[in-house]
Amino acid sequence: MKSSRRTLLAAIAVLHLFAPLAAAAQDIKPRLIRFGYGLNEDSNQGRAVKFFAEEVEKASGGKMRIRAVGSAALGSDVQMQQALVGGAQEMMVGSTATLVGITKEMALWDTPFLFNNVAEADAVLDGPVGQKVMDKLPEKGLVGLVYWENGFRNMTNSKRPITKLEDFDGIKLRVMQNPVYLETFKTMGANAVPMAFSELFTALETKTVDGQENPYTTILSSKFYEVQRFVSATNHVYSPWIVMVSKKYWDALSRDEQRVLMDAARKSRDFERKDTREAAAKAVAELQAKGMQFNSLTPSETDKMRARLTQINASIATNVGMDLWNEAQAELSKIRSGGKGR
Ligand code: TK8
């Protein structure tokens, strides 16, 4: 009895001793941010997330910490978007194309051959049109910080080199879960199958699909060369990634904390685009070294593809809104006539 009382007193004393410490630990407990992405760590996406995480830790003096989770371990793009909206996950980066179900204006970036080169893409995405599209996110529970480069998309498949439009005929092609992509590849004559990126490698391996399309960097980092024979330089669309925060989480942050995330996102954008472009410049040679057969398309075949695909522009314009569509076209004309982006 006596001894148990003594133990109790001792325990209370210990608790008192540690109580202030526990409170202090609470104060300096870093805000832990789960940041999900679809590619693996050893990719342009993985490297940029790591860069972002380091910037945030540095700028916040260690008070904000990023737990980066790649390889779609937190879910596919679409699943992560839902988790952000619900507040179950704080941050992610993924394709704008997979966001169209939430924010229809994102489909502007799915327009085939919208940009001629990366300078045009940077100018429009970072300019007023890019911001206008991003500003549609908060009403859906998401906050967009910056666009990163995924890149110009190219075809791979296990059937034949794509040298002309007719070569798409009957190819069972995985596309992102997005109506514009579905329409684009149906228009080209392929048998388009929407599927999450996280399921793609297995689908190619088991021949559930014959092919897919993605930038060279992703074809390389996701090891698609192990399960695909042909890579063809179709460059049919430029696809951005977007870095987003759950609005529920964002609204709970102080202004300073929001600024830390925004500044780090901007720095990560510059890092990511440079890194991606360097990797893309070397990727075709590396894919060939891994055994893929590479071919480019003649300008006249590319023109035919472009002409065929302009058919779908009208429906994209209607979906994203005529004002936004016209604004994007006007911006591009301005860039092109100014000789910028050439
Ligand atoms: C990664 C995807 C990927 C995209 C795709 O989660 O799905 O093909 O290009 O980058 O967002």
Image (tube, rainbow, N blue to C red):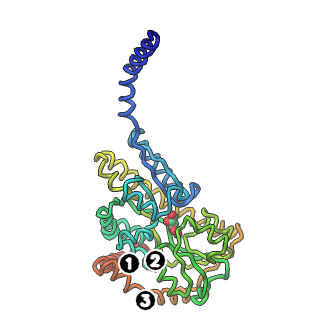
Nearest to N terminus: mark 2 or mark 3: 2
Instruction: Determine contact: label 1, label 2, CB under 8 Å.
Output: yes
Quadrant location of the C terminus? bottom left
Closest to the observer, 186 or 313:
186
Q: What element carries label 3?
A: helix
Which of the two discs, 2 and 3, sits closer to the camera? 3
Q: Which residue bears the numbered disc 2?
A: 116
Q: Which of marks 3 and 1 is nearer the N terminus?
A: 3
For numbered disc 2, what is the local secondary structure? loop
Mark 2: few/some/many CA within 10 Å (<14, 14-19, 20+): some
Residue 162 is drawn in which quadrant?
bottom right
Instruction: Return the x and y of residue 9 as percentages of the image width and height.
Output: 40, 14
What residue is rendered at 60% in x and 81% in y? 172
Of the two numbered discs 3 and 1 in the rendering, the one whose residue sits closer to the viewer? 3
Relative to 29, 222 lies left or right: right
**What is the three-letter code of the residue carrying label 3?**
Gln
Q: What residue type is labelled 1?
A: Arg
Q: Quick one: label 1 or label 2, which is nearer the N terminus?
A: 2
Residue in the picture at 42% in, 79% down: 111
Q: Where is residue 227 in the image (x, y as percent from the top left)?
A: 67, 70
Is residue 216 found left or right of 258 in the rendered image?
A: right
| Residue density around tag 1, few if under 14, some if 14–19, many if 20 or more, within 10 Å | some
Disc 2 marks a residue whose amino acid type is Asn
The answer to whether the residue labelled 2 contacts the one labelled 3, judged by CB atoms less than 8 Å apart, is no
Residue ID for mark 1 = 336
Q: How far apart are marks 2 and 3 (CA)?
A: 18 Å
State the residue position of label 3.
311
